[in-house]
Image: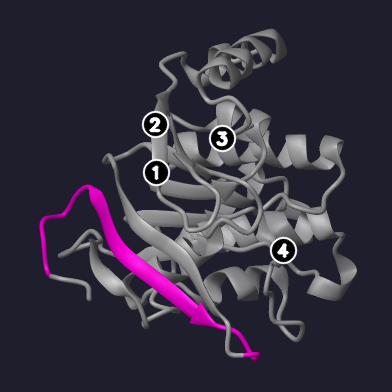
Amino acid sequence: MQPVGAAAPLKVDIAEKVFRSAEGVTITALRGLSFEVRQGEIACLLGPSGCGKTTTLRILLGLERDYSGSFRLPQGDGDRIAAVFQEPVLLPWRTVEENVRLTLPEGLKDTNLDALFETLGLSAMRSLYPSELSLGLARRAAMARAFSTEPAILFLDEPFASLDEATADRLRHLLISVWSARPTTALMVTHNLREAVMLADRIIVLTPRPARVSGVFEISLPRQSRTAQAIERIAAEFRDRFAGAG
């Protein structure tokens, strides 16, 4: 159920989400999961693999409807939702620019995307097809597609998974750059503590399945001040508070 509510923040109250396996085994993925994401912040859902992070995002995106509970997304003017998944999901018969513009709402069809492509290092790739891109470039195109719609809220499901660390780190910096130019409320799923510390204003820590919130870790240090040393220091503080979580 998604009730009509105020514009912000994202508010999640999922009482329970249960799966039934092909063998008939009942698996409870989420139970008593409640949290909020404040307007204009990046929050990370951090938890062990298989704890229900992606299931939570699928519920919020309307891809999972069989659950008990409720959530509230921004409502009214400019209530667009965008998502970046682990796979870029680009149409192979369309160019990079065509893939990006395909999702633009009617009022934004003629938007000048030069600055966005420049920020993401895609200016020279606009006329290329997905088969001509590396995985890292394809994920940049997926980010461009999400931000081009000027969303009220952005969901990211481990968008840098399966990349080598150097490529993933470049994309994290690019994400910060494009988000800083086009700030929006964002909820990102990750199991990478360093990534969460680098990107988030708050880390929402989930328990093993069935997932619930075990605590929230606030990061007040501005992103531009999060050097490698600062990230390691904050990560150590996180580990001291949430032993075994990161």
Q: CA distance from mark 3 to mark 2?
A: 21 Å
First reached walking from the N terminus: tag 4 or tag 3: 4
Q: Does 81 sit above or below residue 65? A: above
Pointer 4 with pointer 2, Cβ within 8 A: no
Give the left or right position of residue 88, taking residue 111 as reference.
right
Dot 1 lies on which element?
strand
Instruction: Find the magenta span and give its range.
Output: 4-23
Mark 1 and mark 2: Cα distance apart in space: 8 Å
Is residue 103 visible to us here? yes
Mark 1 and mark 4: Cα distance apart in space: 41 Å
Residue 216: give its label.
Answer: 2
Q: Are marks 1 and 2 in contact (CB under 8 Å)?
A: yes
Earlier residue among tags 3 and 2: 3
Residue 178: numbered disc: none
Q: Which residue is mark 1?
A: 213
Label tally:
4
User: In the image shown, does 20 or 54 lie closer to the viewer?
Assistant: 20
Q: Which residue is mark 4?
A: 126
